[in-house]
Amino acid sequence: MKKRSNVRWGVFTLVFLATAINYLDRSNMGVAGPTMMGDLHLSNVQFGVLSSAFFWSYTLMQIPSGAIVDKLGARLTYTIAVIWWSLFQAAIAVTRSFGALIGMRVLMGIGESPAFPTNTRIMADWLPSSERGFANGLSSMGMAVGAGLMTPVVAWVIETFGWKISFIVTGALGLLWTIAWLYYFKDKPEESKASKEEIEYIRSGQHQEEVQGQSDVKWYQFLKQSNVWVLLFGLFAQDYLLFLILTWLPTYLVVAKHMTLLKAGFNSVLPWVVAAIGAIVGGRLSDYLIKRGWSSINSRRFVLTIGTMLCTVIIPAAFTNSIPLALTLISIAMGGMMLANSNVWAVLADIAPKSSIGTLSGLQNFVGNISGWIAPILTGYLADRLHNFALALVIAGIIAAIGTIGYAFFLKNNDKSKNNEVVVDQVAK
């Protein structure tokens, strides 16, 4: 008997790398923050605005980018997106004025906007339901690797060659990735080098979805589903913590804990190591529960609830003077965030017609990333006014607590076929 191939995991290796580069490019600004602020004479509030500018366009583009990937396919969408954001990432190196820097960040946000809707589209096309939790976890681990595990390397580049070179180097990585992407990836398993056995395995786990989800659903039609509202706020809660840490952790350690940039870079790694572990554990756990007979939504809900609840330990981190304890609590919160985040995209396949998963993922990412407008600026403002970061951390914990309640009590285990019938009927009306 011919052995089943594993082309799908080569695909998700590329997705993992794309996500890692995506978050490496985003986090570069946070690592370069102390140096850039000194060189360009930026206040905490100005740096918060600069960090937030990326999310202005990124967030607004989520709904159209989700529809775009459903129409154009993942291969073309990702190619254009990565080239776009990489070029504007590198362009930051030759930009000096505050206004021009905001422009580069806004343009970069447009380029990165299709990334997660595209990842969700690939997941729906390339995997059976029982493997989506792990694949989502692998993608989420890419966030931790790019944003955290590479922080010491970025800090070293900045200290050795200057902050401008760091943006050129990270921008170049995306351009190299597109070469491998165009060579290896195809929109459908049938177009790739996957064996017949692998294609049959993938499709057997998608059979019910293929039959049920043939109607395109507009993004606003999803707002009639209570489950969608829970998922929208849940991602907002996770992303608020994520973007606070992403944009401010190295600067927080330099300013509030009086570390050197290189030391702050190394100390910033721990929360992201725990986050990477949380991403894989969360994905594996939900897949395991499904194989044990749990429904898809029940398994995802369990992991989402536990993970978001762990985010609330960011609150006591605000009130300790111990650097090791503060980093430990921040790490637990980030591990919980990624534990939950490993399922926020996989659960979409349980409530949406397959043909509109990109659209729903765009809507979810739109709402989640509104936190990127708020967290960087509000944190900078509070740091300037209060001369500490305590209230900023408490706010993130309170938002996570509300998200936990939503997942635990309001995410319903509706039958997918009924869900899809309701959505399609609403579109018809």
Image: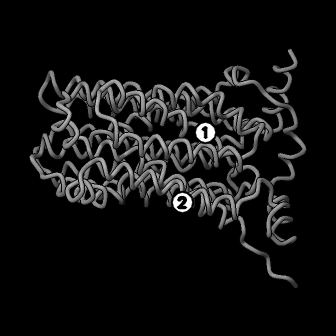
Q: What kind of residue is marked 2?
A: Leu
- Against 309, is 259 above or below? below
Residue receiving disc 1: 114
How far across and how far down the image is residue 79, in percent? 64, 49
Residue furthest right as drawn? 211
Quadrant showing the C terminus: top right
Question: As rendered, which of 115 and 96 lies closer to the eye?
Answer: 96
CA–CA distance in space, label 2 to label 1: 19 Å
Q: Is residue 326 visible in this depiction of the protein? A: yes
How far across and how far down the image is residue 158, in percent? 25, 53
Write down the quadrant of residue 217 in the picture: top right
Its colouring scheme is one colour
Q: Is residue 415 visible in this depiction of the protein? A: no
Residue receiving disc 2: 176
Q: Residue at x 34, y 40 (%)?
A: 94
Question: As rendered, which of 62 and 110 lies closer to the eye?
Answer: 110
Residue furthest front as drawn? 94
- Against 121, is 390 above or below? above
Q: Element at badge 1?
A: loop
